[in-house]
């Protein structure tokens, strides 16, 4: 029933030439290669094209391009003057493009600049587009959804590969207002085209629209789930901080994945799903032949949290409720699946609460009391009333209070799930690198890692660390058993990528931490006596155990102090949380400048009305929102992990949009924090 919905979306992606910005006027106004696609044959055979059709349904779908263009570009589309790539006397300059927020200018010039200008431009670019058409894997050419996913996710990468030029990701959608990419414009046009078509559009309706039927209307929907901060704040250990953040990230990503499989990834205005590691991971499981254009995310990328708990998407009006229900159901089912994996791990391997059944009210009650959902949807354009729902309307406030009280029980589940998460991550993500997962789990090791990194050129510091660890193991051989599974798993990517030998682990430099996990013959003997003792003797034995541990701790601390008398590197950590300033103002367009800051210097229109237009503040259209979402994604998924975990010896706990939560070390924290700030601002490195 949804075939025409997907065809409308494919038209939306390819309604402009892929290489539109490189064309001159003779080739810029045509469609791309959608009529040549096998899956579009039903439209081609009936000569259906939203650009040309007078039919009611197709004309309605055509509005997608008008809405996307007008929303982003204002009146610039009515200007008859044109700007061509490499035009005029200064052909070596390519195109002027502008940052969609700040208006910062950059010259866009492709690697094959000279070859294209020397050839017949139109023929050269059409040949390139034909090559892109031929790149679609044979396995998906007859699969509507498969073709759409390839066009949305792989076509930009295939274009860059064809030209051997990553800068084509910046190719503008409109050369007269070159502030957002063709890829952002095509994606939002596809989302609007699907919403205008309607999910259940049929060929019969395209042929002859029923007289009494209302055309589909696009809605902007927002889905939210809570609690978030409470789940993270309840953490007692560094690993729990990470596990709580990652669970929220995973659940949000899973919702996005399932909804995008049904309605399309282009529907999501926020977060952008393009190049999201978890989405790419699942996409490669679904379409393995896409691996030529999508690199399998590594374990660190998969285990870096970043998805928000607020999702914003474009949908057909009659599918808003269904999509929101699907989002809710997906989250609940995935949470139940995680609960099952946790229960299985605890019962079979740890013999935790052996009398507790998985279907018991206690366990199920803990799971079911965790999440609350809200959603709201508003029409894009004019509609008589907004569609709105919240899970807690006024008349159900008493239920909310009951739910709020139940959160105390939910925290029990939260903490249990967070503690066991590491044990079943491989099953959850269907990956085999169990050691890599364990190594990606954060631990309080950043202090020593930063100390060794800062003093990397002075071998004496590394030798001192090794000598201290050896001395502790010689005095207390049981310590070797404590770190046996830890020594190659610091949880700090800079160390775990074999920058330094990992024979030892920072836990050896923390006496209390080390003794906490001690297992010695003396302790085992006392533990056995404790089990057999009567109540009166148990307190005496507990004091003996405590005294023995205290002696271990004092002896180990004495060794540590002999190597680090004044400043043990294992004692120091920095936990940093931050978010971007004035993000709401950017999202509302308050900080945008006048249009004249985003217009190429060569565009000349001798009209008084155009001069007035240049003084109007630039509007925050859907492509700008889409591109901002993508920019925040690049910051949180690419730049923050690089700065935190490669340039510096830290560990990222959460990076989503403008929010960052990470821990690092005393020796590097100020430089790291400065670099994060400069990066977010877009200043020079």
Image (cartoon, rainbow, N blue to C red):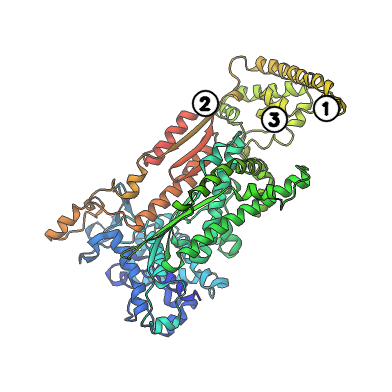
Q: Quadrant of residue 285?
A: bottom right
Horizontal placement of 597 versus 665: left or right?
Answer: left
User: Is 468 on the left-hand or right-hand side of 622?
Assistant: right
Residue 64, given in percent of the width and then of the height, sits at 35, 68
Disc 3: CA contacts within 10 A as few (<14), some (14-19) or many (>=20):
many
**Which numbered disc, 3 or 1, marks the residue closer to the eye?**
1
The residue tagged 1 is 527
The residue pinned by badge 3 equals 504
Residue appearing at x 36%, y 73% in the figure: 61
Q: Are marks 3 and 2 in contact (CB under 8 Å)?
A: no
Residue 631 to residue 467: above or below: below
Residue at which label 2 appears:
667
Q: At which x and y percent is residue 457?
A: 56, 27
Sequence-wise, the earlier of marks 3 and 2 is 3
- In the picture, the quarter occupied by the C terminus is top left
| Local SS, label 2 | loop
């Amino acid at each position: 029933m949804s075939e025409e919905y997907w065809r409308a979306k494919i038209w939306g992606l390819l309604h402009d030439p892929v290489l539109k910005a490189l064309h001159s006027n003779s080739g810029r106004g045509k469609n791309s290669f959608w009529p040549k696609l096998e899956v579009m044959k039903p439209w081609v055979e009936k000569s259906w094209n939203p650009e040309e059709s007078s039919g009611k349904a197709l004309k309605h779908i055509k509005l997608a391009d008008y809405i996307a263009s007008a929303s982003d570009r204002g009146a610039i589309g009515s200007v008859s003057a044109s700007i061509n790539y490499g035009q005029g006397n200064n052909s070596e300059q390519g195109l002027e493009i502008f940052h969609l927020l700040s208006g910062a200018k950059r010259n866009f010039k492709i690697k094959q600049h000279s070859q294209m200008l020397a050839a017949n431009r139109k023929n050269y670019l059409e040949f390139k587009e034909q090559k892109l058409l031929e790149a679609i894997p044979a396995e998906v050419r007859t699969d509507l959804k498969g073709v759409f996913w390839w066009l949305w996710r792989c076509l930009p990468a295939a274009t860059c590969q064809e030209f051997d030029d990553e800068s084509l990701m910046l190719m503008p959608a409109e050369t007269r207002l070159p502030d957002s990419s063709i890829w952002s414009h095509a994606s939002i046009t596809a989302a609007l085209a699907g919403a205008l078509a309607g999910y259940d559009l049929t060929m019969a309706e395209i042929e002859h629209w029923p007289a009494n039927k209302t055309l589909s209307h696009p809605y902007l929907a927002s889905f939210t789930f809570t609690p978030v901060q409470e789940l993270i704040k309840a953490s007692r250990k560094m690993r729990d901080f990470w596990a709580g953040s990652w669970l929220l990230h995973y659940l949000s990503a899973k919702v996005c994945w399932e909804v995008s499989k049904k309605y399309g990834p282009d529907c999501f205005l926020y977060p952008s799903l393009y190049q999201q590691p978890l989405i790419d991971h699942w996409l490669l499981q679904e379409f393995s032949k896409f691996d030529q254009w999508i690199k399998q995310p590594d374990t660190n990328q998969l285990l870096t949290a970043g998805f928000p708990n607020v999702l914003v998407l474009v949908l057909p009006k009659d599918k808003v409720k269904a999509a929101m229900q699907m989002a809710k159901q997906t989250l609940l089912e995935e949470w139940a699946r995680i609960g099952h994996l946790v229960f299985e791990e605890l019962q079979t391997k740890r013999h935790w609460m052996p009398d507790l059944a998985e279907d018991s009210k206690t366990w199920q009650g803990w799971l079911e009391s965790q999440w609350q959902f809200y959603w709201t949807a508003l029409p894009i354009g004019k509609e008589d009333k907004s569609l709105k729902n919240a899970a807690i309307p006024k008349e159900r406030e008493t239920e909310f209070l009951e739910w709020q009280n139940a959160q105390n029980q939910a925290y029990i589940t939260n903490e249990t799930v967070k503690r066991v998460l590491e044990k079943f991550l491989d099953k959850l993500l269907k990956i085999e690198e169990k050691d890599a997962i364990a190594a990606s789990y954060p631990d309080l090791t950043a202090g020593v890692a930063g100390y060794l990194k800062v003093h990397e050129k002075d071998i004496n510091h590394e030798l001192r660390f090794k000598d201290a660890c050896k001395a502790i193991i010689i005095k207390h051989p049981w310590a070797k058993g404590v770190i046996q599974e830890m020594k190659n798993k610091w949880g700090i990517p800079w160390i775990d990528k074999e920058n330094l030998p990992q024979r030892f682990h920072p836990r050896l430099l923390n006496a209390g931490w080390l003794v906490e996990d001690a297992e010695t013959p003396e302790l085992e003997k006392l533990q056995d006596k404790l089990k057999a003792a009567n109540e009166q003797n148990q307190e005496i034995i507990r004091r003996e155990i405590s005294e023995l541990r205290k002696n271990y701790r004092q002896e180990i601390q004495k060794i540590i102090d002999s190597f680090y008398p004044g400043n043990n590197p294992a004692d120091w950590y920095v936990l940093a949380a931050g978010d971007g300033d004035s993000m709401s103002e950017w999202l509302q367009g308050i900080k945008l400048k006048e249009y004249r800051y985003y217009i190429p210097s060569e565009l000349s229109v001798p009209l008084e009305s155009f001069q007035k237009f240049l003084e109007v503040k630039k509007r925050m259209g859907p492509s700008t929102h889409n591109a901002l979402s993508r920019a925040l994604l690049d910051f949180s998924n690419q730049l923050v992990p690089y700065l935190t975990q490669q340039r510096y010896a830290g560990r990222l706990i959460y990076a989503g949009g403008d929010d960052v939560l990470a821990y690092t070390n005393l020796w590097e924290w100020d430089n790291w924090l400065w670099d994060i700030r400069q990066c977010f601002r877009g200043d020079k490195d």
